[in-house]
Each structure stands twice: as structure tokens, then as C-alpha cells.
Amino acid sequence: MNPRTNPKHSQKNPFRIALAGNPNTGKSTLFNALTGLRQHTGNWPGKTVIHAEGSYQYDGDAYTVIDLPGTYSLYSNSADEEVARDCIIFEKPDVTVVVLDATAMERNMNLALQVLEMADRVVLCINLMDEAKKKGIYINEKSLSKKLGVPVVKTSARNRDGLDRLQKVIQEMAYGRTKTNPYRIRYSDELEEKISALEESVTSTFGDRLPARWVALRLLDGDQSLIDSLHQRIELHRKEVHNHGVDESLYPVEA
Amino acid sequence: MGSMNPSIPSKRNSLNALLDQAQTLSSNSIRDEIVSQIHQTGSTVCQDTVRYTDENKMMRSEKLDRILTSKVWGFPIMLALLGIVFWITIAGANVPSAMLADFFGWIEGYLTLAFHALHAPDWLHGVLVLGLYRGLSWVVSVMLPPMAIFFPVFALLENFGYLPRVAFNMDRLFKGAGGHGKQSLTMAMGFGCNAAAIMSTRIIESPRERMMAILTNNFVPCNGRWPTLILLSSLFMATGFAGGAQTLVTASVVMGMVLLGIVVTLAVSWALSKTALKGVPTHYTLELPPYRRPKLWDTILRASIDKSLFVLKRAVIIAAPAGVITWILANIDVGNLSVLEHVVAFLDPFAKALGMDGFILMAFILGLPANEIVLPILLMGYLSTGAMLEVDNLNELKQIFLDHGWTWLTALNMMLFSLLHYPCGTTLVNIYKETKSAKWTFLSFLIPTVIAIGVTFATTQIAHAMGWV
């Protein structure tokens, strides 16, 4: 996945980390805590709508952090969901961190499961642990990690608790040293059959650049905005080839 | 080169083939299956991994919501909180404002001495001290204290999680006006900054409703306009009252402005939904995030230092050159009048019909880049035409206005115009970026401007006809 040969990731070629999550999970607070920036935070949805970028150093490597808009789903119902989806699918961050609100796990799990269908290198970060403790909520992160097949880290970003561990887990995954086995929802036999049929065509069109199963599922759902995005990228790619005369299998074009 | 790459058209064809295949396989029930599977899985996963030990504490948020968003108490509590915020701001800002003004006046004495000691020419002293320094001193004295109080208090409410409750209360009104309930959220964002709020309309799915939120966002006062509203109402709106009652009346006037802005937002939304943006409101659920105890000092420091200084910096950086230019224009004569006076005289008849004067209108026009600089430009305009007052107390600030024929009606009209007029340059740029349409961007300029002119004109004519002024 990562053709980089240089073991140390310098300022010029940093690891790219995306933060996804529902609104109000403290994503921007986590972003600020990691990067030392002061992106405005607030306790309400819609605070972050364009993605903000910041960076940090950890153990000699440079990391770029992308703070995606907080969304409840990635079904491209609105412009902010499209921004988040396109980043995860086309820009392919080295690690996608899904931030969850520890006091509302069930609601937050929807987005986490969607991201797990889209990407392999995923870390779940259960934030707002301080509040969960106050409310008497206990979360078994080991069992959660086992069930979902990706690392789970508990944090309280506004008190800087667990940040070190999160950065360590991100590092391990960025270097490809963490084996993941992301949970993929199994649908009815009828739907699964359709998915596999379509998955093949997706792979023959896009190679392994896009998560074939997920794209197949979205196309079956008739996700018009994704279809538009795919058209757009093929068009961009055509221009690129026209200008440079190289044609590889369709690669993600930086938006 | 393109023709040498036959694989590209084929790639396009294969995407089309893929889409055709998807369409034949697709059925309406797929979305339902996906959504219900995700919910079910999420719920199973959580059942095994999350344990709730204290049902009572989980209910606390719900109990508070039952009061804060109740049909009976929701609005009264909202108004009371808003009123308290304004009251604290106005009551608290007076003394520090006067102290700052004193301080700057004291410095100015030394600056003038220094200029004399260096035998600097009079015009240089005029531009730098009487134009630039004096104008900026006023701006800092009158804008900084209210901001340093208002922003932190507002930020505390915001971080506590109250704004989504405001949105929840307003939701029904917006639906009645044919808009999207989330428009109340983007409106709340506008209280901070309209330019940012335009971006936040991305949370609204339907393009029709999103456009409505964009076109009406400007009707709530942003950071750049709060100081104008607060200052003018404290100088002119409660003159017949003393002490505590004065503060109370001032706060009520500012609150009245906010409510008027909301009423106009709803009215314009309604009108748009019946004309240019016809359609049925979409259904959605608004999630109420949990209440959180804000980090007190963190919030206060960040809000007062970051936000107040940011607004002030913008005001100073843009207003400083504007102040110098204003002073120069006021001191270059063409015929009997200075250039500035020509411009003002040209604008004056129209401005008078709106109950303002040429200086005010000029300040609004020059203030297009940022609302923060309207008041500074106005002050510099006034200061540059003879009435050279030293900055040492706030009554003299009022005197500057009075010397230029201000009455409470002038102040009211300037407040109304500030509330209702066209969005600032940054906001317009954002509207263009978001809508990609020159037509809608122009409309977002035109609609508020027409309303601002209409309202101030009507107010003025009525006040004159009734003999109130």
C-alpha cells in the first residue's frame, strides 16, 4: 500500500492521519491536543465543516493530521459527508482514526462500522472517557478491539489523557506493523450475492485502488454523489494522462 | 497524446457498464437493509462491551432538556439568558472603557510633546496622532471591553451545549417558514461570524434549504457588529434612565435588535420559500448533544484573548490605513470643500432620507471588507473634520456624535442598517465559493441591502411624521 522507501517520515513526506467521527465527540479538541493548533471547538454540530490540517512529530516522524467534518454517516447526504467520504476513499490516509463519544457508544458505532467497511488501517479512539467515568459507563476496549478487528484506544483529549498511547498505536499502524481485520457487516444472502457480482466489475475498473466491496455496496444503494465523484476522477485522470502521457490503473487524484 | 491512450475511453465505458450493472441489481429495499444491519450490529457490539452502572446520571441531560426545551419555558429561558449576557456586557464594559480612554489620552499628550521636540511638521502630527492614533484609541477603548466580556460569556453558553437547544426551540419556527430546522444552527453560528456560518450551511442536505440558510444568515449580528450595536445603544437608547435601569434598557434594546434579526430571517425565509425557492421542507432529526461542563478558565481565556484580539486586530489593521486615507482626504481641498466633504455631501441627501448622514453611509460603504471597521472609519471621518476631541472620556465620544447632529433616531437607524445591510466582503466571497453562482451571490447582497434601506427609510419617515424627533 505504501511505496515509500524512506523509513523515517520527514516533514516533506509525512504520514497522513485522518480524524473521522460524529459531531460533538471532541474531535477538534483531539486535533488541537495532537497538533498544538487552536482550531475553534464548540459543543455543537457543524462546528468543523471544512477539513483542517495540522501536524505533529512523534518519535522522529512527521504526521499530518486532517480533521474531517463531524458527520453521522458517510452516505453522502450532504456536502460535509462528501468531504469526509472523499478523503477516506480517494486520499487514502495512512491511518484513519474514528473518534467516538464514550457516553454515546451505540449511536457513534454507526459511523465506526461504516469506516471499517471503507478502510483497513483504522484506529478507534474512544474519547470523553472522563465524562463516561462520571456517568458510570464502563467500556471493555479489549473485547471491542477483538470484535471489530482494529486497535481501540481510550482518551480524554481535553485532559491529554491517553494521547501518548494513541500516538504510539498510530505509529505502529502507519508503519504497517499492526495487523487489522476490520469487521465487515454480513448482509442477507441475496444482497451478498449482488455485492460479489458487482465487486468483480469494480475491481476490473479501478484495480485495488478503491475498496471494491464498499463501492459495490454504495452503487447498489444508488449513491449518486459517489457516482459523480467517480466520473469526475476518471475525467481528471484523462487530463492527467493527456498532459503527462502515463497511464496506470486509475489512481486516487488528490482533490 | 490523448489519442494514443485508448484505455481511457474504455475506462469511462467500463465505469458506465459498471453503473448499468449496479442499476439492474439495485432495488429499493437495499438502503433499508444496510441501515438496519448497521444499527443492529452497532447495538450488539455495544451490548457486549459497554456497561451502564448508573441510570440516574444518564438521565440528567434529559431532565435538563425537558426544562430548557419545554414548550412553555423554552423561549422565556432563552430570552432571559440572552438578556443576562447583554446586561453583564453593558454593565461591565463602562468602567474599563473609561479607564482605557483615559490611558490613551494620557499617552497622546506625550506623543504630541515628542512630535514637537523632534520638530516634526504639523501635517505629520496631524496624520499620525490626530488621525491614526486618536481614531484607533477610540476604537480600542469602546470595542475591547464589551468584546472581552461578551465573547467569554457567550463561549461558556456555547461550550455548555446550550446553542443546540436554542436551535431545537427555533426548529418549529423555521419549519413554519418553509426552511430546514438546521437553519437555526447555522443562524446560531452567524452570531459568531457570518462567513464561517456560510460554510456551516453544508450540514443542510437539500440545496434549496441550504440556499435559504445562506441568503438569510446575514440577519443575525456577527462579532464585527456586536460592538456597534452595544455601543450605540448604551450611548443613545437609555438617556432618560439612570443607574441600573439604564443598563437594563440598553440590554433590552440590543436584545430587541437580535429578535428583529430573527424575525427578518424567518420572514425572508418564508418569502423565499413561496417564490424563488419553492419546495417542501425535508424531514430530519436534530440531535441534542450532551451538556458538558465547560473548562472555565480555558474557555474564558481563549474566548477573550483569541476572539477579542482577533476582531480588534482586524479592525486595527484594516482601519489604520483607512484612517490615514480618511484624514488625507479630509485635508485635501478641492474648491471650498475637502475631498471627504465632497463625498459626504454627495451621499448626504440619500443618507438623510434613511435617518443617517453621509459620514455613516460612507463608513458602511468603506466598511464592506469587514464590519469591524465601520465604527472606526466613522469616528475618523468625524474627527477629521474639525471636532478634534481628545480621548479622555466616553461622554466626549457621545459629544462627537451630537456635534454631528445625532439623535436617538440616528443611532437607531445606524443599528438597524448594521443589522440588516449587505454581508461583509469575506462572507460574500464564501457565498460565491459555496454556491458557485454570481446570481445567488448578488441576491445575497441585494436582498439585505434593500431591506436595510426600506426599514431605515420607513422608521425615519414614521418618526418624523409622528413628530418624535
Image: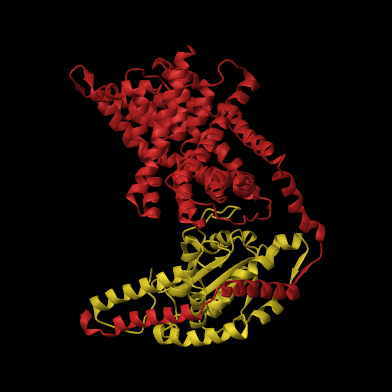
Chain colours: A yellow, B red
Q: Locate residue B346 relative to residue B219 in the image: left or right.
A: left
Of B261 and B172, nearer the camera is B172
Whether residue B238 appears in this view of the structure is yes
Of B370 and B458, nearer the camera is B458
Instruction: Quadrant for the N terminus of chain B, please.
Output: bottom left
Q: Is residue A95 above or below residue B198?
A: below
Of B85 and A175, nearer the camera is B85
Of B387 and B335, nearer the camera is B335
- Residue ID at (36%, 47%): B441
Number of callouts: 0
Which quadrant holds residue B254? top right
Image x and y of residue A178, in percent = 57, 83
Q: Is residue B243 above or below residue B48?
A: above
Q: Is residue B58 above or below residue B174?
A: below
Q: Residue furthest top?
A: B467
Whether residue A140 appears in this view of the structure is no
Image x and y of residue B5, in percent = 25, 84
Q: Residue furthest left?
A: B335
Q: Is residue B146 above or below residue B284?
A: above
- Residue ID at (68%, 52%): B291
Image x and y of residue B372, in percent = 43, 37
Image x and y of residue A163, in percent = 60, 68
Q: Locate residue A88 relative to residue A101 in the image: left or right.
A: left
Which quadrant holds residue A188? bottom right
